[in-house]
Image: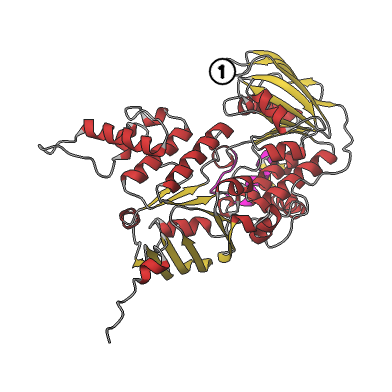
Amino acid sequence: MHAEPAQDMTAIAGPAPALEMHGIGKRFPGVVALEGVDLTLARGKVHALMGENGAGKSTLIKIMAGVYGKDAGTIRIGGQEVELRTPRDALAQGIKVVFQEIALISEFTVAENIFLERHPVGRAGSIDWKRIRAESASLFKRIGFDVDPAARTGNLPVSQQQMVEIARALAHEARIVVMDEPTSSLTPNEVALLFKVIRRLTELGIAVVYVTHKLDEVFEIADEVTVLRDGRHISTKPIGEHTHDSLIQDMIGRRIENLFPRSRGHAQGDVALSVSNLSTDVKLRDVSFEVRAGEVLGFFGLMGAGRTELAKAIVGFDPIRSGAIEIGGKPLKPHDTRTGVALGIGLLTEDRKGEGLMLELPVRQNMSLAALAGFSRAGFVDEGREKEAVQGYVDRFRIRTPSLSQLIKNLSGGNQQKVLLARWLMRGLKVIVVDEPTRGIDVGAKSEIFALLDRLASEGLAVVMMTSEMPELLGLSDRIVVMAGGRITATFDRDEATQEKILNAAIA
């Protein structure tokens, strides 16, 4: 008898997954960041990684990128066990992470950034610049996106800088590309282009890890989704097995009956903020609107429309060329933030870490900053009264912090945002201007921020909300103002506003 030839089990089972992470654990002093986490990436598929802030997503992708070493578990790439001790190890294994803070050298050209780690050289040992530019152009052609290899990288918009990072990944023959919150600064048109490029990557057999808080994007682009919660693996499912509700429930461990809770019939009072024919040297042109006490007035516009510029102008931060601003019937004169605060208007800035928070100070001092005069006697702060007031807002807003002495930088994004809201309310306001109030915040915290804004409006505060998120615009606003090119192009009542009408006005 002749023995049967051995079967090729690899051929039967198919190719090994692009990446397998099994039982991954990671501890920091006093914190278990990850415990027993599993993640398997299929070649040519988009795998979404989701969870609330603090769920462990960033830690997991930093282990994948070689930034952190794992404390437990195994990692296999193409079926072979590997150790990723440094970012160089990860890059050598074909793993490229495009972090939210894009890591390019702004003074270098696109081509120089792409081949930063390994410049092609000619026969004499000098850098072959002609080849670098030609190969860069070829890489962009592969992903179906046109960027000038000779352009200075710092002059490119964020969307094109992301394409440079993706081209870098291809230059290193990446088999796995991780994208961390890739659409946080993109317009809807740029998001559509990014998704086109992501699909092109999967056609090339590359596994894409997509980290985001945005549920609609996951349902549009992902093939599978893994959810982490409190550093543990909760579920991995094909996206077709999820609904919005089931995905939210996996992420936060409970159902959210209504992501946009609204009080019934806010009673609207007198005009709290009036803006007439406002223009600036840089962006705004003849902007006029009113918002009443108890009203949520939503502003929408694509990138560059002027929403942030308007937010800063109406609180006295950015200078104006002409026009008038009245708060509670009193003119904002002189036009500066000190006068604005005195009249009762405050700004919850888009960039809470860069412009709002003092990261190295505790919760107590961050919250009480705008109201210190109310706690001072003879030039000294009455810490007892200050702590009592801060604790009151911590309880009222359900701010999760181990103590008032906790450094603000250690809180989640949602809790940081609540502290900033409390800062202004402690000062006493008639109008709160919130610019992208849920940027970088997970879905559970978003629901709480929405409920807070709605409650504040029901208590008589005028809320001016600048947002690029269509669901929260339609879900929270009593009226919607649309901007394009620094001017108002349309205003809609809540009942008549639709996504189509709003987008048509935004591209006017």
The amino acid marked with disc number 1 is Val
Front one among 118 and 199:
199
* Quadrant where the image shows the N terminus: bottom left
Residue 360 included in the magenta stretch of the image: yes
Magenta segment? 356-373
Q: Residue at x 50, y 55 (%)?
A: 58
Residue 294: give x, y in percent of width and height.
84, 35
Give percent across and percent down for residue 404. 65, 55
Where 475 falls versus 286 (above or below)? Answer: below
Quadrant where the C terminus sits is top right
Q: Does any portion of residue 209 appear in the rendered image?
A: yes
Quarter of the view holding residue 401? bottom right
- From the image, give the main secondary structure of the stretch colored magenta: helix
Q: Residue at x 66, y 28 (%)?
A: 503
Residue 320, how many percent across, how many down? 63, 17
Q: Residue at x 65, y 57 (%)?
A: 242
Q: Which residue is mark 1?
A: 282
Q: Residue 326, can we see it? A: no
399 vs 496, left or right, is left
Q: Is residue 301 left or right of residue 134?
A: right
Q: Is residue 251 shown left or right of residue 267?
A: left
> Quadrant of residue 331 in the image?
top right
Figure check: 329 above or below 103: above
